[in-house]
Amino acid sequence: MEILELFWEEIIGFLGIGQALDILQAGNFEAFKTYDGITALIYPIIPFLVLLELVLGLIYKKPQTKVYKVNFLIYVFNRFVGRFIAIAMVTFCIGLFQPYALLETRFTWYWLVYGYIVWEFGHFLYHYWGHKVRLFWCLHSTHHAPENMNLSVTYAHFFLEAPYADVIRTTVCILLGVQPELLFLIMFIDGTYGAFIHVGENLIRNGKFGFLSKFILTPSHHRVHHARNPLYMDTNFCNLLNIWDRLFGTYQEEVDSVKIEYGITRSMDSGSFLDVYFGEIIALYKDVSRAPGLKNKLLYLVMPPGWHHGGDHKTARVVRHNYLKSRTTP
């Protein structure tokens, strides 16, 4: 019976309906008008869209079984290994850095706008370094391994990535004066939308969203980010507001003539949990062990993926530069 109860609790947890069920059982329907009540209604949206997307994939005969299987295993593994680490790191960073905040904000709409722009900057930094620093790429590559895009990809993360990401994002926000109440609201909005932009073609075929793409990052933008095509590599690092991508020159729209190819450039078995989860760590270990001298070994940890001690670099920057150069050469 305990196993069944645990299984049932995990289902409730995955669907995100626990809080809503508690409100319904208490019969206090007015609670749905509060912040907690609103979040209780929003939390289940992404899990139910995941299930809908899966069903539509079966109907369209594009089930993407391999992606769902591996991402489900990752979700289960992370539930046991890294369940509370990210929350602890957020709390730690708030307590550590809040006394050094450069300014003080309040819970108002204009400070919310400010806070979101600051949060997006922190997100850009974490995400950019996750692609440009080999050690951090080992944490982030699990998220890029799936060779199809669907909402289950939002669960595909190495268990240490969330703590690494939240340390950077929280530190930036707290130092720039975003108060914890605002921060938690921003994290909720960002987490919900950040999951949604992984929606696949089975549910939303064209994710460009018209004129909105001028201001926000759309599913189309994020599909570009997950692509391994030379044109698309290492672009669109933002999550909701694409302001920092435009400012730092990493913005890239989807080009109809360049069909997106999902996944990473390393030859791998995307249907293997071990390869998806630990493959980049193993590849880094091999490169470090083969590198001559301590300096080269250390450089493999901090230089971008594709960097080589012999000078034959195949980083995203080099590959994309060569591709763009070939397109302009007569």
Image (cartoon, rainbow, N blue to C red):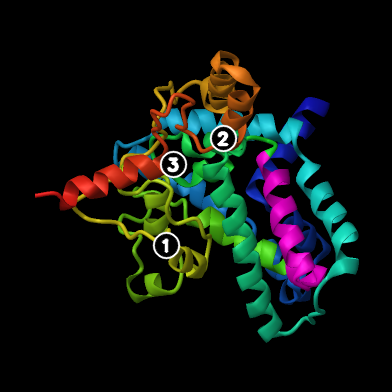
On residue 134, which mark appears?
A: 2
- Per the model, the C-alpha gap separating discs 1 and 3 is 35 Å
Q: Looking at numbered disc 1 in the image, what kind of residue is underneath it?
A: Gly
Q: Label 1, on which residue?
A: 249
Bin the neighbour count of mark 3 within 10 Å (Cα to Cα): few under 14, some 14-19, many 20 and up: many
Query: In the image shown, does 154 or 242 lie closer to the viewer?
Result: 242
Q: Give percent across and percent down for residue 72.
A: 57, 32
Asked if the residues shown at circle 1 and circle 3 are in contact, with their CB atoms under 8 angstroms apart, the answer is no
- The range drawn in magenta is 161-184
Asked whether 199 falls inside the magenta stretch, the response is no
Query: In the image shown, does 202 or 327 lie closer to the viewer?
Result: 327
Q: Is residue 136 left or right of residue 312?
A: right
N-terminal-most mark, 1 or 3: 3
N-terminal-most mark, 1 or 2: 2
Q: Residue at x 60, y 65 (%)?
A: 120
Q: Secondary structure at mark 2?
A: helix
Question: Which quarter of the rendered picture does the N terminus lie within?
Answer: top right
Answer yes or no: is residue 275 visible.
Answer: yes
Mark in the foreground, 2 or 3: 2
Q: Looking at numbered disc 3 in the image, what kind of residue is underneath it?
A: Leu
On residue 54, which mark appears?
A: 3
